[in-house]
Image: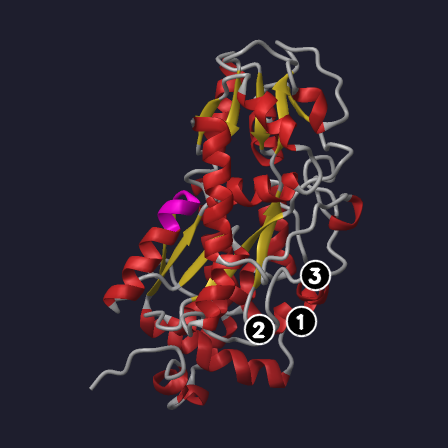
């Protein structure tokens, strides 16, 4: 009978793994560059991934073009053929949580790896036994992430982090604020957008962090500006480009970078009070159907090569020690940011729901 679950993953791949042909081994740069001990660790994983033939990955940020580059580099690094598929789905945080919760409830997991900026939820799934433990050697480079409570050693870190900050189109608005407070009445009513925290876990976490630095009156004043409630960061930026909005309260530097590369003039502010770092917690499901490929994907996405792709294409902030951002203007080093801390591990979904109700009362009542 076929067993399900993460721990059995290497069984089939390990049998006869050392009979892997020389020609195949030469096709895997990861093996050619590895130490003997690392080759012994990697070889059964690669063979197992070849037999699995595919893996499924869900994320809330990475754009399809970035995924295409990641997939090609991943296959090349591990000597996997073009027939190996990384089935990718880009979705919102709420939709990702709902999908995984449904799969867990039905005990029919189809997702191997997921990434979402909701560490509190991931910690809860870990405590419930739904997140696989995997001591990836690449995670050893994320010690400061674990020290800051943004991940769990030998389980998960983040593939990249981002922030939500005030953003505007410099071709349509002359804004020189330095504080969150400067957003109030900077544009007419109805010409500003805000991330919908009633639906999105990442916008909600940002709101929770902001309440630690800003008075309640600030949020009621912001609500009085009658903001449009949006979910996708791509739409937030596009409405600034077209002029539908003059300012976005929940702008994402990643989208400023991508639109500016096409000729836009989007600008953003890192408020002096601080920002909430949103870590894209990347984890393997305990019952991942392709556990070998999931492990390799975790290795690659957290490696120097994987982080360079994500930072260069998505302007994501890396948690990898010693990493030099190729886009420091959009994705500065964590040490350069003033952060509004959140107790991700200490919060519960009940706490999140209470804050969601508070936000909804202020902005939608």
230 up-or-down from 63: above or below: above
Which residue is under mark 2? 136
Seen in the picture, residue 158 relative to 90 is either above or below; the reply is below
Location of residue 7 by image quarter: bottom left
Q: Residue at x 63, y 60 (%)?
A: 150
Q: In terms of secondary structure, where does tag 1 sit?
A: helix
Which labelled disc corresponds to residue 148? 3
Asked whether 119 falls inside the magenta stretch, the response is no
The answer to whether the residues at label 2 and label 1 have Cβ atoms under 8 Å apart is: yes
For discs 3 and 1, the disc positioned in front in the rendered view: 3
Residue beneath disc 1 = 140
Question: Where does residue 104 sit, x and y in percent of width and height?
Answer: 31, 65
Tell which circle, 3 or 2, labels the residue nearer the N-terminal end. 2
Q: Element type at marker 3?
A: loop
Q: Is 7 or 357 nearer to us in this picture?
A: 357
Q: Are marks 3 and 1 in contact (CB under 8 Å)?
A: no
Q: Secondary structure at mark 2?
A: loop
Alpha-carbon span between mark 3 and mark 2: 19 Å
């Amino acid at each position: 009978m076929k067993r399900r679950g993460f721990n059995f993953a290497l069984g089939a791949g390990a049998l006869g793994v050392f009979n892997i042909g020389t020609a195949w081994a030469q096709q895997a740069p990861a093996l050619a560059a590895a130490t003997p001990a690392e080759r012994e660790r990697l070889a059964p994983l690669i063979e197992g991934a070849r037999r699995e033939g595919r893996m499924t990955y869900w994320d809330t940020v990475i754009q399809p073009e970035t995924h295409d580059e990641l997939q090609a580099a991943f296959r090349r690094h591990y000597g996997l053929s073009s027939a190996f598929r990384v089935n990718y789905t880009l979705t919102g945080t709420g939709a990702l949580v709902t999908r995984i919760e449904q799969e867990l409830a039905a005990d029919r997991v189809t997702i191997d790896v997921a990434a979402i900026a909701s560490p509190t939820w991931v910690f809860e799934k870990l405590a419930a036994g739904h997140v696989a433990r995997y001591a990836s050697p690449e995670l050893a480079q994320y010690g400061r992430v674990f020290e800051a409570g943004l991940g769990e050693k030998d389980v998960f870190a983040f593939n990249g982090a981002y922030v939500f900050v005030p953003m505007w189109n410099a071709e349509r608005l002359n804004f020189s604020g330095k504080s969150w407070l400067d957003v109030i009445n900077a544009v007419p009513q109805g010409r500003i957008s805000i991330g919908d925290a009633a639906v999105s876990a990442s916008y909600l976490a940002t709101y929770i962090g902001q309440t630690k630095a800003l008075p309640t009156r600030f949020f009621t004043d912001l609500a009085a500006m009658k903001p449009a409630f949006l979910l996708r960061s791509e739409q937030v930026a596009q409405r600034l480009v077209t002029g539908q909005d003059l300012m976005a309260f929940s702008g994402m530097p990643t989208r400023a970078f991508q639109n500016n590369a096409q000729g836009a003039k989007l600008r953003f502010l890192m408020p002096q009070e601080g920002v909430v770092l949103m870590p894209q917690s990347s984890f393997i499901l305990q019952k991942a159907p392709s556990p070998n490929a999931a492990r390799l994907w975790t290795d690659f996405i957290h490696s120097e090569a994987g982080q360079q792709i994500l930072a260069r294409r998505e302007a994501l902030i890396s948690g990898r020690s010693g990493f030099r951002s190729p886009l420091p203007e959009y994705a500065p080093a964590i040490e350069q940011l003033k952060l509004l801390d959140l107790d991700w591990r200490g919060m519960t979904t009940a706490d999140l729901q209470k804050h969601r109700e508070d936000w909804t009362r202020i902005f939608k009542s």
